[in-house]
Amino acid sequence: MENKQLIIPGYLKVLFVILLTTSIIFILIVGKSILIPLFLGGFISILLTPIGNWLESKRVSRVFSALISLISGLLIICGFLAFVILQVASFSRDLENVGDRLNRYLSDFDSWVYDNFNIETGIGQGIDQGYLIDLLQSNSSSLAEFILNTIGSLSGIILLPVFIFFFLIYRDHLTEFLVHLFKESKQENIKSEIRELRKVVQRYIIGILKVMAILAVMNTAVLFGLGIKHAIFFAVFAAILNIIPYLGPFLGAILPTIFAFLTKDSLFYPLGVVISFLIIQLIESNFLTPKIVGNNVNLNAFITFIGLLVGASIWGVIGMVMIIPTLAVLRKIFELSESTKPFALLLGEENNQKNGNVNTES
């Protein structure tokens, strides 16, 4: 007796995908405190995997190689956080003079609006400088609170290194799981695709870090050249925000532009900041990112934009940061099976659709 294949109507498939997507988003929201460190730990462990592989090639056991890799990653993260704290502390010391000048501008603007339109804006009284200064001068607690809110909770910070450690130890076990999950394909092909998937994520994260470092140097040089105080703080802040597609470069240029406007006597300086950041952004988008990051992610702009909105709505800033590599991983996983390749086609660039090839990687 021949086995009859069950044919599911197209509209039922679409309905199933919508319900599955809704269920996944609901789970992501409810399980935020555990899933954020889980996802973040997965990406960091992928980044630390080459260190573990190198140590194991030197006959170091997997447990010790994972532990050394974990400690190395944590030291780098703690060093960066210490640098941020020092920069915020330095920046907060100049807020009082900036606040006085901002209040004068607000008062003049309020008077101009009232004289010309007979409208009271209510901003003539200025901002509460004491509150603003206290907020930034308590940088240690503020930064700690920001990290807690970003990762989810104190338990999330504790779980993060634990997840990284276990991902490093059981990375081969997870590979075998995916091989058995897509058993209709050849095992060697699946293992090759998984290794390529790791390389894609590694190249993307390392490429982004390289671009951020170059942008930080370029931004610092420009701001120093214009004589803007706290150039390193503004430069690094703008470089970090650049990781958020589309919105990041714009947000990164706002703070140094406003600071230049409030601390300098000429409009040349804020305009110089805007023009310089525009030129740097053109260099980044047309040269740095294509050459360094390349098409490792290869997602279309519409999916990227939707992903950013969804990531921000469910997980905030950390969601916007992690959504792009997550979608890239999903696209590669969808390519492992013929039944899921249409979803890889949906996530990929349009030129792949025209060429009829969703496996193109540069």
Image (cartoon, grey):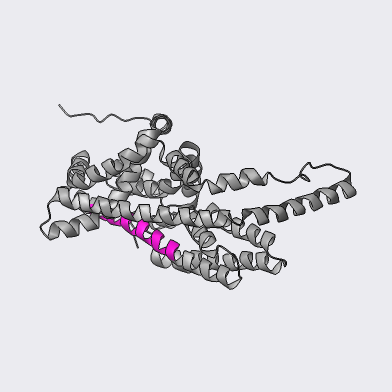
Q: Main secondary structure of the magenta part?
A: helix
* 285 vs 54, nearest the viewer: 54
Q: Is residue 294 visible?
A: no
Question: Horizontal and vertical percent for residue 290?
Answer: 43, 65
Q: Residue furthest left?
A: 59
Q: Residue furthest bottom?
A: 225
Q: Which residue is at a point 18% across and 60% down the rendered structure image?
A: 54
> Would residue 215 be found to the left or right of residue 185 on screen?
right
Q: Which residue is at a point 78% across and 41% down the rendered structure image?
A: 122
Q: Quadrant of the C terminus?
A: bottom left
Q: Is residue 150 above or below residue 81?
A: above
Q: Quadrant of the N terminus?
A: top left
29 is within the stretch colored magenta: no
Q: Which residue is at a point 65% across and 57% down the rendered structure image?
A: 258
Give the magenta range: 195-213
Question: Horizontal and vertical percent for residue 327?
Answer: 39, 46
200 is within the stretch colored magenta: yes
Question: Horizontal and vertical percent for residue 68?
Answer: 21, 53
* 123 vs 299, nearest the viewer: 123
* 265 vs 292, nearest the viewer: 265
